[in-house]
Image: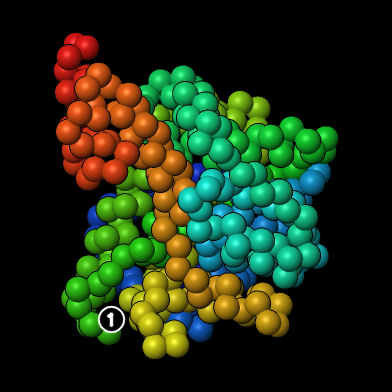
C-alpha cells in the first residue's frame, strides 16, 4: 500500500484496528521494505506526526508510562525532540528489572520522573482492586491492570493532566519478542513473520476481548486520555510493509528484535545514552516484578494451609508442588 492510501493521522487515543480492517488475512507480498534504516526514519516521522496530533488535541501536562523498554523510551525521546517533555511514571516492585533503564532514560531526556515502588502488600491490595474492577482473576489481565491502577497515584497529583502516553502495541505490530525459524531474507521468513504479526494483532487489536471495558474499568475518567501511540489504523498500514530484515538483525554480535525501532530510538536519544535503545526486556508483568511478588504471595498462602510444612516447605519447594497444593485447597473448599 502506498503512503497516499494510508488513513489520515489521528489524535484518537486508541483505534481497534481489527474491528475496522481485515488484518487476519495473510498478505506477505506487502512486506517489501527490507532496509532497517529506511524503516527507522519512517517510524520516527510517523511517531512525530502522531504525537503532534495528540498533543494538539489534548491540552495540559502530558505523562508517559515509561517501562524501561525501547517502545516507551522511543516515544519519550521523540516527544523530547519535539520540545515536549512528558512527566514519566514507572511502576516497579522489589523484583523488578525496569527501574534502572527507565531512570536513565528519564535523566537523559530531562524528564521529571515518578518511580512508584510497590511492596508485596501493595501488590496484593492492588490485585484485589483490579479483580473487583475487571470481574476476573485471569493472570495476564490482572497483572497488566496493576501498573495502570498504581499509576493513578501520579495522575491524581497533576491538576492539568494532559494525554497519558504509552508504547503499548509496538510488540504486536513489529514482531517484538518473536524469533523466526527461517533466514530473515527468505520468503519463508516473510511468510512466517506476516502470519505471526497478523495472528497476534487480530487477537489483541479488537474491542471485544476477554474484558472489553478493560481501560475504563481500571482508569475511570483517565481512560479517555490513555493514548496508545502505535494502535491506530494508520500505524498498521505503515508497518505491514516491513519485511523481516527491517525487524530482525544483529547488534554488537547479539540478535535483536524490532531492529528498525531500536535504530530509530538510538538516533533520537542524546549522545551517550544510545545504549538504552538496545536493552532487552520481558513483558511488563514480569519485568516490573509483579509475577515474582504474586508468586511469593502464593507460596506464603500455601505455607499457611493446614499441614503444609509437614513434609516440605511451600516457601522453597518447586512451583509445580505449590500449584498442586493450591488446587487441592480449592477442591477441598468446593
Q: Nearer the viewer, residue 118 or 57?
A: 118
Q: Nearer the viewer, residue 323 or 226?
A: 323
Q: On the picture, is 221 further left or further right than 132?
A: right
Instruction: Using the image, determine if residue 288 lies above or below residue 196.
Output: above
Q: Is residue 160 visible?
A: yes
The percent coordinates of residue 71 (x first, y second) are: 53, 62
Taking the spot 40% from the left edge, 29% from the top edge, the residue there is 211
Q: Circle 1 sits in a helix, a strand or a loop, which is it?
A: loop
The percent coordinates of residue 326 (x first, y second) are: 24, 27
Q: Which residue is mark 1?
A: 184
Instruction: Using the image, determine if residue 303 lies above or below residue 6.
Output: above
Screen quadrant of the N terminus:
bottom left
Determine the image quadrant of residue 53: bottom right
Instruction: Using the image, determine if residue 48 lies above or below residue 318.
Output: below
Q: Nearer the viewer, residue 17 or 209?
A: 209
The percent coordinates of residue 13 (x first, y second) are: 59, 43
Q: Nearer the viewer, residue 308 or 11?
A: 308
Q: Given the current orientation, which residue lies at the most extreme bottom position?
A: 253
Q: How many marks?
A: 1
Amino acid at each position: 500500500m502506498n503512503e497516499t492510501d494510508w488513513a489520515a493521522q489521528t489524535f484518537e487515543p486508541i483505534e481497534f484496528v481489527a474491528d475496522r480492517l481485515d488484518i487476519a488475512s495473510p498478505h506477505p507480498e506487502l512486506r517489501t521494505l527490507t532496509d532497517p534504516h529506511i524503516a527507522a526514519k519512517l517510524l520516527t516521522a510517523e511517531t512525530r506526526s502522531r504525537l503532534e496530533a495528540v498533543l494538539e488535541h489534548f491540552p495540559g501536562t502530558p505523562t508517559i508510562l515509561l517501562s524501561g523498554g525501547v517502545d516507551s523510551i522511543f516515544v519519550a525521546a521523540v516527544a523530547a525532540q519535539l520540545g515536549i517533555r512528558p512527566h514519566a511514571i514507572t511502576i516497579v516492585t522489589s523484583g523488578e528489572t525496569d527501574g534502572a533503564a527507565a531512570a536513565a532514560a528519564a535523566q537523559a531526556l530531562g524528564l521529571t520522573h515518578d518511580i512508584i515502588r510497590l511492596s508485596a502488600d501493595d501488590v496484593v491490595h492492588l490485585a484485589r482492586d483490579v479483580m473487583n474492577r475487571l470481574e476476573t482473576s485471569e493472570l495476564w489481565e490482572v497483572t497488566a491492570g496493576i501498573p495502570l491502577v498504581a499509576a493513578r497515584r501520579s495522575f491524581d497529583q497533576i491538576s492539568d493532566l494532559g494525554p497519558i502516553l504509552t508504547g503499548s502495541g509496538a510488540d504486536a505490530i513489529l514482531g517484538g519478542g518473536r524469533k523466526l525459524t527461517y533466514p530473515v531474507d527468505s520468503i519463508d521468513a516473510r511468510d512466517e513473520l506476516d502470519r505471526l504479526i497478523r495472528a497476534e494483532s487480530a487477537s489483541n487489536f479488537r474491542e471485544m476481548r476477554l474484558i472489553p471495558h478493560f481501560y475504563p474499568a481500571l482508569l475511570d475518567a483517565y481512560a479517555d486520555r490513555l493514548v496508545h501511540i502505535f494502535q491506530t489504523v494508520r500505524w498498521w498500514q505503515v508497518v505491514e510493509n516491513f519485511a523481516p530484515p527491517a525487524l530482525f538483525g544483529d547488534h554488537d554480535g547479539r540478535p535483536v528484535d524490532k531492529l528498525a525501532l531500536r535504530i530509530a530510538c538510538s538516533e533520537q536519544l542524546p549522545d551517550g545514552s544510545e545504549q538504552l535503545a538496545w536493552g532487552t526486556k520481558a513483558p511488563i508483568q514480569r519485568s516490573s516484578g509483579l509475577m515474582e511478588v504474586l508468586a511469593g504471595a502464593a507460596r506464603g498462602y500455601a505455607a499457611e494451609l493446614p499441614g503444609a510444612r509437614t513434609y516440605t516447605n511451600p516457601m522453597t519447594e518447586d512451583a509445580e508442588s505449590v500449584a498442586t497444593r493450591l488446587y487441592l485447597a480449592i477442591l477441598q473448599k468446593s
